Amino acid sequence: MSELPLSVVVPVFNEQDNIAPLIGEITSALRGLVAFEIVYVDDASRDRTAEVLKAQKATVPELRVIQHEQQSGQSTAIRTGVKAARGTWIGMLDGDGQNDPADLAKLWREHLASTPAIKLFAGWRTTRRDTFSKRISSKVANAVRSRLLRDATPDTGCGLKLFERETFLDLPYFNHMHRYLPALVMRAGWQVKSVPVQHRARTTGVSKYGMWNRLWVGLADLRGVAWLIRRSKRTAAREL
């Protein structure tokens, strides 16, 4: 399998109206900057998502589409996309259109100008375009997570990220792991850099997450990630 510098992975579930506009923005942002592919992972959508993606493949040569046979969640969809990707680096963004694809180019330039020790560039939504309840729940979650995990990242919930494929696949996998990538990458001995990015209001479709389904699962995940960090052990090695 030939390698590319960059694969853009987009997990989606019931996002039929956001697909074509977002793909257009991704290609506009990256063509001429870096060789890339776009890997959409349809998490067994029940609307016309698969149909729209098939139509887009006919006109967008960079596009690849993978479909789950059963709904498995965002973390699994991301991992499916990363495993299938041909890129050395993975750009990731949500499929709802709230992340600005122009910021993928910004993260790529940050990567090119940075030390190789930084394996994750995390988007930081300095201005949120969400409902009041989502902003409050996110603020509380970030504060609790930062205090417990000490991951030095102001916004782990931002779907816009750039990371090395090999580093990601070496991390422990579990459901909802995508929310803890900074802590997991730091646990592996690498550095993380937060980069201010844009955030946009959702214009079509409905959010798949609410305050309560994030909160209770998040508390259990936090305890698990904290345990992983406490039990980690790293050592340098060299071949003789």
Image (cartoon, rainbow, N blue to C red):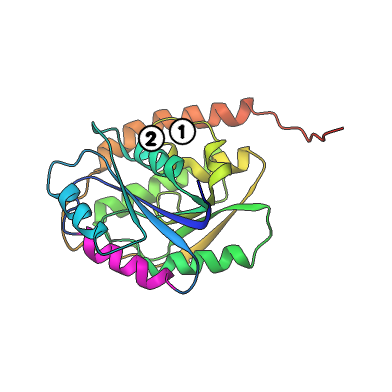
Q: Is residue 26 visible to us here?
A: yes
Residue 40 drawn above or below residue 199: above
Which residue is painted at 42% across and 39% down in the image?
79
Which residue is painted at 48% across and 49% down in the image?
86
**Does the residue at mark 2 contact the one at mark 1 (Cβ under 8 Å)?**
yes
Horizontal side, residue 152 vs residue 11: left or right: right
Which SS class for mark 2?
helix
The residue indicated by pointer 2 is 218
Q: Residues within 10 Å of mark 1 (few under 14, many from 20)?
A: some
Disc 1 residue type (three-letter): Leu
Query: Which quarter of the image is occupied by the C terminus?
Result: top right
Magenta part of the chain: 18-31
- Marks 2 and 1, how far apart at CA: 6 Å
Disc 2 residue type (three-letter): Gly
Which SS class for mark 1?
helix
Residue 96 drawn above or below residue 80: below
Residue 104 sits in quarter: bottom left
Q: Is residue 19 magenta?
A: yes
Q: What secondary structure prevails in the magenta region?
A: helix
Q: Is residue 179 visible to us here?
A: no
Q: Residues within 10 Å of mark 2 (few under 14, many from 20)?
A: some
Which residue is painted at 67% across and 41% down in the image?
189
Residue 126 sits in quarter: bottom left
Q: Is residue 142 magenta?
A: no
Horizontal side, residue 145 vs residue 43: left or right: right
Give x and y (percent) for residue 113: 64, 68
- Residue 198 versus residue 138: which sits nearer the camera? 198
Which residue is painted at 26% across and 57% down in the image?
57
The residue indicated by pointer 1 is 222
